Image (spheres, grey):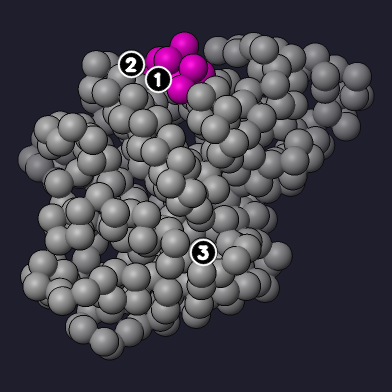
């Protein structure tokens, strides 16, 4: 499906000879993005770097890396006061060796925590278990991690609070100010890192997405009014090809308001769930690419949106969902730009075109 952006970027490329045009369109995503002043990268696990086929492809395609799970407190602090940075440090070394920047994900979340943390927070005599951890992590990686998801998924309107915040253990112990204090601690620990508030739920067109967007805007406006040092909104970008879809009008209006606040916009975890579709792989891959194109048709029209990451680069490491039906059908997810053999899929081409298109094409 041609989108407005692909038509225009195609027209722009029309001035190139077919051979040059093919060469430009074949450029890795990190180079295509850089040509339009953007960046592209992906999440990875350090174990993937031991895959001799994959590591060079990752270095070719990604200009930004984010640890999929190895900077989460579950991995970093498995027992109180004992830290394991090994996985994250392997990824950071790989990024440095290949001219990539690094994103840190995530320091304050209601999930992916060690078993001991929630009880310890609820019994904590002060904020050190929160702000001390943020300070220590950001200081440790100062100069090596350029952008952080300090707080992740703090919004959940369905929890019924007037402020629409998630009623998680952080909020139960410290109140809503836990968010502000996490960002103030991060800024004090690193004066230049980009501090991002990361969440999901703002992409779709259903009533719950409307509530999510309204709550997110109210939260961001309030935080900025309190001078909380949030530099950008992280839009996770987890989409689905066959159930629910991006509402382009609502998403565009939402992102225009985020930009008007002076915030940058990152797509931090993009992938397209292809479950629920037909068994025909070509049909699934096309639907995934079209969902991605419709999403970036809006997001990358916004001049505040410059960084795009997918939640992985290849289908190779994706696990089939549990359950008998999935097992019997032999379904394996095809959510990412490269297939399990590291071959570029229609999603890769859709993203390549979107990343190359100039900003602000209306
Ligand atoms: C997931 C990872 O993919 C898993 O490997 C990990 O075990 C749990 O977290 N939103 C987020 C990501 O912000 O951190 C989550 O990633 C997916 C949902």
Q: Is mark 2 within 8 Å of ligand 1?
A: no
Label 1 Cα crowd, 10 Å radius (few <14 / some 14-19 / many 20+): many
Work out whether mark 3 precedes mark 1 in sequence or the reverse, and give the earlier one.
Answer: 3
Q: Which mark is residue 224?
A: none
Q: Quadrant of residue 357?
A: top right
User: How many numbered dots are placed on residues in this image?
Assistant: 3
Q: Which residues are magenta?
A: 242-254
Q: Quadrant where the C terminus lies?
A: top right
Residue 245 falls inside the magenta stretch: yes
> How many neighbours does mark 3 have within 10 angstroms: few (below 14), some (14-19), or many (20 or more)?
many
Judge left or right: residue 210 versus residue 223: left
Is 5 magenta? The answer is no
Residue at image position (35%, 83%) is: 84
- Looking at the image, residue 327 sits to the left or right of residue 61; the answer is left
Q: Residue furthest front?
A: 226
Checking the image for residue 187, the label placed there is 3
- Residue placed at 68% from the left, 67% from the top? 98
Structural distance between the alpha carbons of marks 3 and 2: 34 Å
Residue 246 is tagged as 1
Q: Is residue 264 above or below residue 97?
A: above
Badge number at residue 205: 2
Secondary structure beneath disc 2? loop
State which quarter of the image contains the N terminus. top right
- Dot 3 falls on a residue whose secondary structure is helix
Residue sitting nearer the eye, 161 or 102: 161
Q: CA distance from mark 3 to mark 1?
A: 33 Å
Task: Classify mark 2: residues with Cα within 10 Å, few (<14), some (14-19) or many (20+).
Answer: some
């Amino acid at each position: 499906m041609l989108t407005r952006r692909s038509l225009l970027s195609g027209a722009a490329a029309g001035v190139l000879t077919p051979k040059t045009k093919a060469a430009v369109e074949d450029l890795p995503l990190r180079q295509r993005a850089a040509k339009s002043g953007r960046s592209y990268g992906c999440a990875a696990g350090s174990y993937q770097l031991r895959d001799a086929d994959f590591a060079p492809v990752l270095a070719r395609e990604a200009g930004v890396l984010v640890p999929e799970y190895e900077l989460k407190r579950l991995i970093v602090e498995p027992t109180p006061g004992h830290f394991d940075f090994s996985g994250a440090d392997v990824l950071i070394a790989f990024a440095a060796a290949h001219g990539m920047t690094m994103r840190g994900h995530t320091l304050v979340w209601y999930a992916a925590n060690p078993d001991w943390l929630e009880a310890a927070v609820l019994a904590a005599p002060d904020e050190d278990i929160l702000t001390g951890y943020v300070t220590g992590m950001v200081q440790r990686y100062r100069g090596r991690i350029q952008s952080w998801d300090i707080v992740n998924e703090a919004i959940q309107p369905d929890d019924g609070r007037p402020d629409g915040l998630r009623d998680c253990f952080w909020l139960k112990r410290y109140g809503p100010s836990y968010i502000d204090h996490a960002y103030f601690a991060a800024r004090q620990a690193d004066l230049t890192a980009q501090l991002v508030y990361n969440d999901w739920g703002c992409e779709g067109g259903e009533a719950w997405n409307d509530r999510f967007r309204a709550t997110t805007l109210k939260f961001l406006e309030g935080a900025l009014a309190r001078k909380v040092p949030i530099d950008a909104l992280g839009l996770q970008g987890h989409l689905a090809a066959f159930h629910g879809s991006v509402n382009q009008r609502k998403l565009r209006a939402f992102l225009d308001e985020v930009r008007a606040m002076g915030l940058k916009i990152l797509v931090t975890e993009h992938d397209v769930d292809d479950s629920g579709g037909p068994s025909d792989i070509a049909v699934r891959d096309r639907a995934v690419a079209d969902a991605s194109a419709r999403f970036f048709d809006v997001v990358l029209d916004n001049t505040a949106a410059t960084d795009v990451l997918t939640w992985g680069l290849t289908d190779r490491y994706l696990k089939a969902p549990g359950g008998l039906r999935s097992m019997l059908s032999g379904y394996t997810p095809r959510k990412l730009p490269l297939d399990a053999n590291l071959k570029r899929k229609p999603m890769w081409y859709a993203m390549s075109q979107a990343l190359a298109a100039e900003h602000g094409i209306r």
